[in-house]
Image: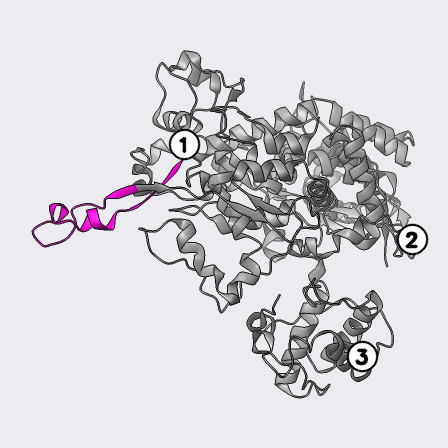
Amino acid sequence: MRFTWTVLIMLSVGLPIRAAEPPNLAQIGVPFVAKYCVSCHGEKKPKADISLHTLTCDLSKPKELQVWQAVLAQIDSRDMPPKASKQPTDNERTQLLQSLTAAIKASGVVLDDNKWLSPVKGNYVDHQLLFSGVPAKEITGTKARLWRITGPAYEDYIDKLIKRFILGLRNYGEFRLTAPWNFTPQKDFPDYASAHRVGEAEIEYLLRNAAIVSQAMIKRHSGNVPSYGGYIKELATLIKAGMKATPEQADAVLTPTFRELFGREPSDREKERYGTFLRNTTASLGGAEAAEQLLIALLCQTEMIYRIEVPNKLGTPQKLDARSLSRSLAFALTDQLPDQLLQEAVAQGKFGTREEVAIQVRRILDDAKVEKPRVLRFFREYFGYDSAPNVFKDEVTLQKIGVRGARGWNADFYVSDADQLVLSVLAQDRDVLRELLTTTKTFAMTNPPQDRRGTKSDEYRLKKPNFEQDEQTLIKVYELPIKARADWDPKKTYDFPEGHRLGLLTHPAWLVAQSGNFDNHAIHRGRWIRERLLGGRIPELPITVNAMLPDEPHHTLRDRIKVTREEYCWTCHKQMDPLGLPFEQFDHFGQFRKEEMVVDREATADKKNLNKNGLPRQTIHKLVPLDTTGEVSGSIDPKLDGPVKDPFELIRRLAHSEHVEQVFVRHAFRYFLGRNETMADGPTLIAAHQAYRKNGGSMKALITALLTSDALLYRTNQ
């Protein structure tokens, strides 16, 4: 393995250090480099043309400082020394990191102490140590935090409030009160507690929404008592009193309003804070204005923006109070506030112990009437297939597969079908990961969430006698024997042709999501497998590299991708390309194929195909044999390593691996807990994996284990 020096020298990196007196760099750094690095990066034929044998500890020299920063990055990420070389002990590595970090900071470089919180760093914790069974030396639990609620959670709350009080707002289409924030699409889980804060723009948006809802609430409570819908009698009394409103009327408003908006009583601090505000505003502006200002304030308070996960005491880990814990649990599964049964459990003092939390988790997971969008969203974000509609396919490219016009292509169908497939596997709850990786079934043309034609229901489409263009394309891509509308059932699973598909990694939704605009993307597919199934680490692309394959349409993708075999590229690409190339079994529309189409240069240049100006009238293509071989290498599990003849052999090998299951559990931890795992979470991960296996590959058991672990129950300020 070699250093990616060009990019790393430009980075400022660091490790959070708590040691009061870090070891001296001169005593630690130079001996460490001499012992573990100089054999490859010495005077004679140094790897990557980088020599470390002349390093001193004078960080006042810019070049010396840059090299030490690169050393820090490589040692910190455990990319160096290479796995095949002699490794430093944990104590030696820690001492170097502490001394080097302190020295670089002392030189004036600002280091990112929070870089390990990023989702892209999730796989950097040593997998074997995590699952070694060694008791954690660190404090368990999760650091106290504010975790911003999701955009859908905010919108759901506002929508339900509007409907419950019958506010008369047109909360749909262009009039919908949308969330002030949402996630930027990315390849890793976007919903991390450490990743999002609310700024000035979001606060202004929040205030606008709050003002709209508050004005509608005032109108609702200003007239006659409605015969149905939500109604706060004390609020109406204050509003109608106007300038004659009394302090007693103002005091009476707070508790029932809190109950209606948040399902709880105000705390003593809130009574003091909002009570004083309400009395003063009532005295100066009257009851109606005071009521409106109170509603705006409540709809903009911290609870509307964040999950508040802060212990009542400082120091050692403290269990979250029952109400905060109930909110965390509810948002983790439903993206909504706690339901009535969970609120009652909190009120009755029956929610707090691990067993009581488990009862509520199982109840929510088992109740089909309780919507659990975050469970499906986990699989969407884990597999990444939901980004398929974002991959643009132009009309010229579509014509190559016989599709004329953009109306003939609707990637939303494939995503919706994949969603239904995931939900059907979750309903069975047996060997969930293995089944998702190896199923040969699919749904067909289930109702996409955003249908380009405006068709909003399967029932409506069932009445149409003929399939539309995009439906015909889907039937062709899936290779299904559906000849007429009468043969189609959106609630039925169909079998793919034997030997043509195997699980979500061969489903068109995933294949299209992991493709480019005009061709396959074997590198992306290989990287996904390396990171999401094998738990590997791929450095980000150096900014100095122009990552473009040769524009040689007369060659296959496998031939064009050989440029990555150059020494500078192959260190990373050997971890991705051999894993992604077997999926050349499919084209970038997700169609199964046995041959690849390339440009026939000779036929295109033939004079029979030339116009009077000597230019080709059309580009002529030909079919060439496919090579779908690949290889698994460098995995922790030696049973996984070795060549594969096609994607199906690769998938079967991965699907039956315990190591792959463990990596899957790690990703589930990150999603449901909103942070990367640490070494202290090793026992939690082992327990979650054991729960998954002992219960026959049950996703419910896995989620229950995670949401009853110390990582959810306890918070610490350390």
Label 1 vs 2, first from the N-terminus? 2
Vertical order, 124 against 61 (above or below): above
Q: Quadrant of residue 267?
A: top right
Q: Which residue is mark 1?
A: 452
Q: Quick one: which residue is furthest to the top in this view?
A: 486
Q: What residue sits 67% from the left and 68% below the top?
A: 74
Is label 1 in a helix, a strand or a loop?
loop
Vertical order, 716 against 353 (above or below): below
For label 2, the crowd category at 10 Å Cα-Cα, with few meaning under 14, some 14 to 19 and many 20 or more, is few
Q: Amino acid at mark 2?
A: Lys
Label 2 to label 3, Cα distance in Å? 39 Å
Numbered label attached to residue 313: 2
Q: Position of residue 561 (x, y in %)?
A: 44, 55
Residue nearest the viewer, comparing 447 with 645 = 645
The stretch in magenta equals: 593-622
Q: Position of residue 605 (x, y in %)?
A: 18, 51
Label 1 vs 3, first from the N-terminus? 3
Q: Position of residue 611 (x, y in %)?
A: 10, 49
Label 2 vs 3, first from the N-terminus? 3
